[in-house]
Image (tube, rainbow, N blue to C red):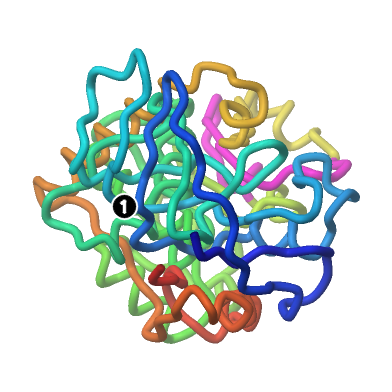
């Protein structure tokens, strides 16, 4: 089968077109003919850092985590998928799991779900990693109807999904952004936009919560921005973040009695730990999408499998708005 492989780690030109063996079906798995995949930050980190990142596969490797495609074969013990089913998921591209930058991919049946019927393969491939991340973060933060919810980075890959899901769960949603296009997208998705470049945390907390703070904060920016989240949170508030690889003064969280939830959605793949949770989340997301409450925002440019290097460059440039998708 045709695949884009890397024989070494480095910049975006390390991808090479190769003809490699089609995976053999095995128990508990399905063989998927991949229609599309998308680029996530972790894909570019693996490509660049290689062994410096503990979750990287050994070269030569097939990267790519997200996918949408059609089931071609079903392994022993799999009863909830059949040949011909259209599915989506995040099931490879790290450690010992070959990825989706290939014509076929072997996927653990626990990690996938039926594709939303009202999305194309191209659209569905944009969702799994970011949507699972957003859903898990809001779920762990115990989001409830009527709460004031702040999403940091609401025009980004994870953020634009978290924003829509928060609205679906019945919250009053606000989101930070930093440019005209970002602010317009946040408003178009149904949240009240906050320009973090011109408004201080104290200003927007007073404006939108009368100084009480936000009940739930989904911080997809993370890092030192967590200090802004601590400041913006209500007493005993909930904060979910996807980026916490740093040392940080937790005094602000301590004196408000905040709960901090670190979301690292690769755990089920890396450790074969509760993988069925991801399949279940994807099935719930499909229902939400089919009911019209969630849609992926896609970059205006599209790329073929052979153009994966250009797709990584597009992602890294920050010039696009929405997920970068590769048609296989």
The image quadrant of residue 144 is: top left
Q: Could you tell whether 304 is left or right of 71 in the image?
A: right
Please give the name of the residue rendered at 68% of the width and 47% of the height, measured from the top-left corner: 243
User: Quick one: SS at disc 1?
Assistant: strand
Q: Position of residue 111 (x, y in %)?
A: 43, 31
Mark 1 Cα within 10 Å, few/some/many (few <14, many 20+)?
many
Q: Position of residue 248 (x, y in %)?
A: 84, 42
Please give the name of the residue rendered at 29% of the width and 70% of the height, measured from the top-left corner: 187
State the quadrant of the C terminus: bottom left
Magenta segment range? Answer: 229-248
Disc 1: which residue: 69
Question: In the image as oriented, which residue stretches furthest toward the top?
Answer: 77
Q: Is residue 6 visible?
A: yes
Q: Is residue 212 visible?
A: no
Q: Position of residue 315 (x, y in %)?
A: 58, 75
Q: Could you tell whether 120 is left or right of 134 in the image?
A: left
């Amino acid at each position: 089968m045709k695949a884009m492989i890397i024989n070494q780690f480095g910049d975006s030109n390390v991808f090479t077109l190769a003809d490699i063996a089609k995976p053999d079906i095995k128990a508990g798995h399905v063989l998927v003919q991949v229609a599309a995949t998308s680029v996530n930050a972790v894909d570019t980190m693996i490509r660049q850092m290689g062994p410096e990142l503990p979750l990287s596969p050994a070269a030569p490797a097939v990267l790519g985590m997200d996918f949408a495609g059609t089931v071609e074969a079903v392994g022993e013990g799999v009863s909830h998928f059949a040949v011909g089913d259209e599915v989506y998921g995040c099931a490879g591209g790290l450690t010992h799991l070959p990825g989706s930058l290939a014509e076929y991919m072997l996927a653990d049946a626990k990690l996938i779900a039926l594709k939303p019927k009202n999305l194309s393969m191209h659209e569905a491939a944009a969702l799994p990693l970011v949507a699972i991340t957003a859903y898990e973060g809001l779920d762990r933060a115990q989001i409830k109807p009527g709460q004031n919810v702040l999403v940091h980075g609401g025009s980004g890959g994870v953020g634009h999904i978290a924003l829509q899901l928060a609205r679906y769960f019945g919250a009053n949603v606000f989101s930070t952004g930093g440019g005209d296009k970002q602010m317009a997208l946040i408003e178009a998705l149904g949240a009240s936009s906050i320009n973090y470049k011109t408004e201080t945390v104290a200003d927007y907390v007073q404006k939108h919560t009368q100084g009480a703070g936000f009940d739930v904060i989904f911080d997809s920016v993370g890092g030192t921005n967590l200090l802004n989240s601590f400041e913006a949170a209500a007493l005993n508030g909930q904060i979910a973040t996807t980026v916490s690889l740093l040392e940080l003064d937790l005094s602000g969280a301590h004196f408000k009695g905040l709960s901090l939830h670190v979301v690292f959605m690769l755990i089920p793949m890396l450790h074969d730990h509760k993988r069925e949770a991801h399949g279940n989340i994807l099935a719930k997301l499909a229902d939400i999408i089919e009911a019209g409450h969630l849609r992926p925002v896609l970059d205006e440019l599209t790329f073929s499998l052979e153009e994966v290097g250009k797709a990584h460059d597009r992602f890294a440039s920050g010039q696009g708005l929405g997920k970068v998708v590769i048609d296989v």
